[in-house]
Image (cartoon, rainbow, N blue to C red):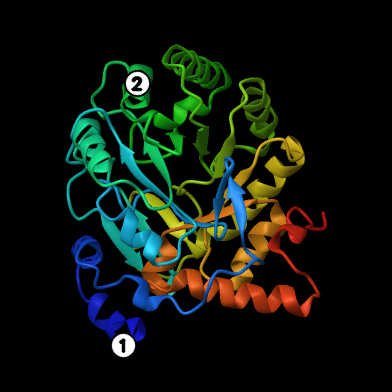
């Protein structure tokens, strides 16, 4: 069905098309009718001690205001991450701010953490209990005087309703946000977050989402801080403001974060470097170019324990999870394997 409508949808401005998708999910037009497969033991796993049907999650950025996470569970996602959410409402950057690069199976966005604010989103989630594992992605307001305090405000708002909270330090669309990859700033941020969680007496898992544009030699320093503070998972990675040289679409020079297939290779490379650094002590959620069984297989080989996607759904449609599972099962079965976990980190270096 999606293939028939895709050409029409792609004639629309990307942000308008996205808003229509949100409305369609709200009214259940895109829900479980797309699900063909049943629960499959080959993909069952658990994340933060919670059983989930498969390791494929929806990345933050699609459901920014926590409007449609339950319909998204209905599309087959094993877990859903909403946000990025800031303490106060903000409209984000000026439009247009999302660009399709169809020839490259990619998107560029410079949204800038547009959302309705932590308090309103908190009320939405409390009035609509999640039917699956829900992650909440948080960040600072653009004009804040104290970025660390913004993270702490969001922690206080969401720690008791989130299954995990992601600390977003990696968007290229908020000025100076990526400065938190600096070892001293990163240490200060994580120390503050862990102290806040201690004062809240909260054991909600904390996850950190990092940039694909860090240098390889920064991995060991970041890994050390993650391990020292017992961070429960790392997401690799956010969008990139690089990797434009080999793109074919005329929109390739738009300012913003690039996602989709052009990010896949760098994401896999960075996942593998972190896998070898962390040695299985912290789960890795791999993001970047996931849209097929083969791309999922390569992510697991590189060392990811779980996956997330967003751009893949834009190009493959709402049944993307079932597509990935079907194709991945074929690959695993042909190799005589019974479970996706058997291939995690088996990439030959």
* Image position of 174 (left or right of 21): right
- What is the quadrant of the C terminus in the image? bottom right
Q: Nearer the viewer, mark 2 or mark 1?
A: 1
* Image position of 73 (left or right of 206): left
Q: Which residue is mark 2?
A: 147
- What is the quadrant of the N terminus in the image? bottom left
Q: Residue furthest bottom?
A: 4
Count neighbours of disc 2 (C-alpha within 10 A) and say few if under 14, some if 14 to 19, many if 20 or more.
some
Q: Residue at horizontal 18%, vertical 34%? A: 89
Q: Nearer the viewer, residue 137 or 239?
A: 137
**Residue 327, position in %: x, y?**
60, 77
Q: Nearer the viewer, residue 29 or 214?
A: 29
Q: Residue at horizontal 75%, vertical 53%? A: 345
Q: Disc 2 or 1, which lies upstream in sequence? A: 1
Element under disc 2? helix
**Residue 223, position in %: x, y?**
66, 30
Q: Nearer the viewer, residue 163 or 320?
A: 163
Q: Is residue 37 above or below residue 69?
A: below
Element under disc 1? helix
* Image position of 148 (left or right of 303): left
> How far apart, in angstroms, are the residues tagged by discs 2 and 1?
45 Å
Q: Is residue 136 above or below residue 196?
A: below
User: Taking the image as drawn, is residue 74 in sight?
Assistant: yes
Mark seen at residue 4: 1
* Image position of 61 (left or right of 282): left
**Residue 153, position in %: x, y?**
31, 21
Please state the total of marks drawn on the protein image: 2
User: Taking the image as drawn, is residue 102 in sight?
Assistant: no
Q: Is residue 79 above or below residue 231?
A: below
């Amino acid at each position: 069905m999606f293939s028939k409508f895709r050409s029409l949808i792609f004639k629309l401005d990307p942000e308008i098309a996205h808003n229509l998708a949100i409305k369609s999910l709200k009214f259940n037009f895109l829900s479980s009718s797309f699900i063909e497969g049943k629960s499959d033991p080959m993909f069952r796993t658990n994340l933060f001690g919670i059983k989930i049907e498969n390791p494929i999650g929806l990345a933050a950025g699609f459901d920014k205001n926590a409007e449609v996470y339950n319909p998204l569970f209905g599309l087959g996602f094993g877990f859903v991450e909403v946000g990025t959410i800031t303490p106060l409402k903000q409209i984000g950057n000026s439009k247009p701010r999302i660009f399709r690069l169809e020839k490259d199976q990619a998107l560029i966005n410079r949204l800038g953490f547009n959302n309705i604010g932590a308090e309103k989103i908190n009320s939405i989630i409390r009035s609509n209990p999640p039917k699956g594992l829900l992650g909440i992605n948080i960040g600072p307001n653009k004009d804040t005087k104290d970025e660390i305090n913004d993270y702490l405000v969001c922690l206080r708002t969401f720690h008791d309703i989130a299954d995990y909270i992601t600390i977003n330090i990696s968007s290229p669309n908020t000025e100076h946000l990526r400065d938190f990859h600096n070892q001293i700033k990163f240490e200060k941020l994580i120390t503050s977050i862990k102290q806040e969680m201690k004062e809240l007496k909260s054991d909600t898992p904390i996850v950190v989402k990092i940039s694909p544009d860090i240098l390889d030699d920064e991995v060991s320093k970041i890994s050390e801080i993650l391990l020292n503070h017992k961070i429960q998972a790392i997401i690799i990675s956010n969008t990139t403001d690089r990797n434009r040289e080999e793109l074919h679409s005329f929109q390739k020079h738009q300012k913003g974060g690039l996602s989709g297939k052009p990010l896949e290779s760098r994401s896999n490379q960075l996942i593998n470097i972190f896998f070898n650094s962390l040695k299985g002590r912290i789960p890795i959620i791999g993001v970047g170019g996931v849209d097929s069984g083969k791309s999922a297989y390569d992510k697991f080989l590189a060392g990811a324990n779980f996956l997330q996607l967003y751009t893949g759904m834009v190009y493959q449609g709402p049944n993307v999870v079932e597509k990935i599972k079907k194709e991945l099962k074929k690959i695993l079965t042909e190799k005589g394997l019974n479970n996706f976990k058997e291939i995690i980190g088996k990439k030959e270096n």
